[in-house]
Every structure is written in structure tokens, then in C-alpha cells.
Image: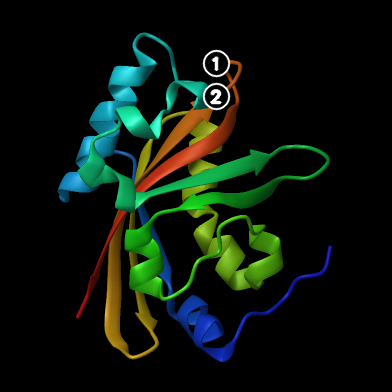
Amino acid sequence: MTVRRDNEQTRAFLASVEFDLDPELRIENPAPALALAEWNGLRGDRAMPAPADIDALDLPRQLLPHLLLLDIEHEPVLRYRWRLIGTHTTAALGRDMTGRYWDDIYDDRGLAMLARGPQWVLRHRRPVRVLGAATYADKDHVRSESVDLPLSNDGTTAHRILIATVYRTG
């Protein structure tokens, strides 16, 4: 696989991005909190809901623009692919990477930083809150709050991660 470096604006953003993980889930924004509540309702007494349990028609409409869906390929090597990126994220970042593999669009540092949340979820098989900060393009500063929510086909291994994100600039 060939790693493609995106434009200068994307490289500058990835060079500035930092993420902190919060396993205690001290969520402040309504969209990630609502996503966590929906995820808990769908999982019931299971460790994780299945990807098939997620139906956009059944989710609260105000949540949809904030959702991202990340495919996880475990074999032959671990890879992440953006399956869906909501309009809140594409508007905040000015691009849509739906369908793209992370190792095709992010450099090594960006990939390592972005993978912190998904790697934690894969290890612990439970949600994590992710706080981000970066400088991006003509915006002074971009801050984000996300919750990464594992989805499993077999009840043991996360095969997708549902992410609810809120971006703020300034």
C-alpha cells in the first residue's frame, strides 16, 4: 500500500493535532452524550451492539450530522477506513474522506494520533471520550469532543466504531 500525502493544509492540520482520551466519559456536548445513550440502549446486556443494530432511520435526527462510522479490518494487517463521515465533520474540516483508508490519507504522525481512540476501544471493548485540539486552515483553532463507540459482529471483537463528534472553532 502506498501512503498518499494530502495537500499542505491537511499536513499542517495533522502536524498540529493532539488528542486526549477520557475513559471516564465525562461528556460535555449533547451530541456525544446522546450517541452514548443510544449505544447503551442498543447494546442492552451485551458488551457491544452489532453494526446491524444501527439504523439511521431510528437514530435521533439531530445526531446524524455528528456521526462517523469507522470500519476496522483486522486481517491481514490492522487498517481503518472511513465508512461514513457526517456533514458536521465535513463542514468543520472542509473535506470528505468517506470510503478512504487512513493509511492512504494520513502521514505516520497523523495516523498514530488519530488511531489513539480506536486502539483504546479495540483493547478495552468499551467507549472512550476523545478530546482534540488543532490548528486548521483559516480557523484559529479547532477543538473537538467525540465519543468512540465499538460495534461487534461476534460480541467480542470490535468490527466498526461509531463516532459522534462536535467541532468548535475559535
Tag 1–tag 2 contact (CB < 8 Å): yes
Q: Is residue 110 above or below residue 49?
A: below
> Which residue is under mark 1?
155
Relative placement, left or right, of 62 versus 21 is left
Badge 2 marks a residue whose secondary structure is strand
Q: Quadrant of residue 41?
A: top left
Residue where numbered disc 2 is placed = 152
- Residue drawn at point x = 44 percent, y = 40 percent: 162
Residue 145 is situated, as x and y percent measured from the top left of the image, at 28, 56
Please tell me which residue is depicted at 65% across the width and 69% down the height of the picture: 105
Task: Tell how many labels.
Answer: 2
In this rendering, is residue 26 above or below 5? above
| Mark 1 crowd level (few <14, some 14–19, many ≥20, 10 Å Cα) | some
Disc 1 element = loop
Distance from label 1 to label 2 (Cα)? 5 Å
- The residue lying at 36 percent from left, 60 percent from top is 87
